[in-house]
């Protein structure tokens, strides 16, 4: 194979990979970790040691870890980045301390107010019906 043909093949493979990454980055599917939260317009400080996550999967299912309990729900996507979560179900284990329980309850009450979403780079942002920021998540990339 000559050098010109090798460069063309390499360029094609590189372009296909970049297109896949670009398309994949704009989808909800995958795991996200909470990095920022607001309740009633005020920033809520979450314990960074506690991994609060959500995972968007197949068939419009979402699940995750709220701190000490796992949860799941289904959702519907509508035009203009509108998202409608069905009632969330979760395990009911007692949290290790009151602060963690408060953090988890805050997460559930804030996610319940979500009306819209936006993906900006590696971040997923949830908004309420007045377009106020509620929750900000960072995409989690799995290392092979």
Image (tube, helix red, strand yellow):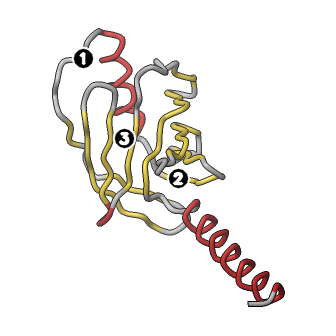
| Label 2: few (<14), some (14–19) or many (≥20) C-alpha neighbours in 10 Å | many
| Label 3: few (<14), some (14–19) or many (≥20) C-alpha neighbours in 10 Å | some
Dots 3 and 1: beta carbons under 8 Å? no
The residue positioned farthest toward the left in the image shown: 92
Residue in the picture at 75% in, 78% down = 11
> SS for tag 2?
strand
Quadrant assignment, res 51: top left
Dots 3 and 2: beta carbons under 8 Å? no
Q: Position of residue 64 (x, y in %)?
A: 32, 41
- Could you tell which of marks 1 and 2 lies nearer the N-terminus? 1
Quadrant assignment, res 98: top left
- Could you tell which of marks 3 and 1 lies nearer the N-terminus? 1
**Residue that carries the numbered disc 3 in the rendered image:** 112
Q: Position of residue 125 (x, y in %)?
A: 56, 45
| Label 1: few (<14), some (14–19) or many (≥20) C-alpha neighbours in 10 Å | some
| Quadrant of the drawing holding the N terminus | bottom right
**Residue that carries the numbered disc 1 in the rendered image:** 95
């Amino acid at each position: 194979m000559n050098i010109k043909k090798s460069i063309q093949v390499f360029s094609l493979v590189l372009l296909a990979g970049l297109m896949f990454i670009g398309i994949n980055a704009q989808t909800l599917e995958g795991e996200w970790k909470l990095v920022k939260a607001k309740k009633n317009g005020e920033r809520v400080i979450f314990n960074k040691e506690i991994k609060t996550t959500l995972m968007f999967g197949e068939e419009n299912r979402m699940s995750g870890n709220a701190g000490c309990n796992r949860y799941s729900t289904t959702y519907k996507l509508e035009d203009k980045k509108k998202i409608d979560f069905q009632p969330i179900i979760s395990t009911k284990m007692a949290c290790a301390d009151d602060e963690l329980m408060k953090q988890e309850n805050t997460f559930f009450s804030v996610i319940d107010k979500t009306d819209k979403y936006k993906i900006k780079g590696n971040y997923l942002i949830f908004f309420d019906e007045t377009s106020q920021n509620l929750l900000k998540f960072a995409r989690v990339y799995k290392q092979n």
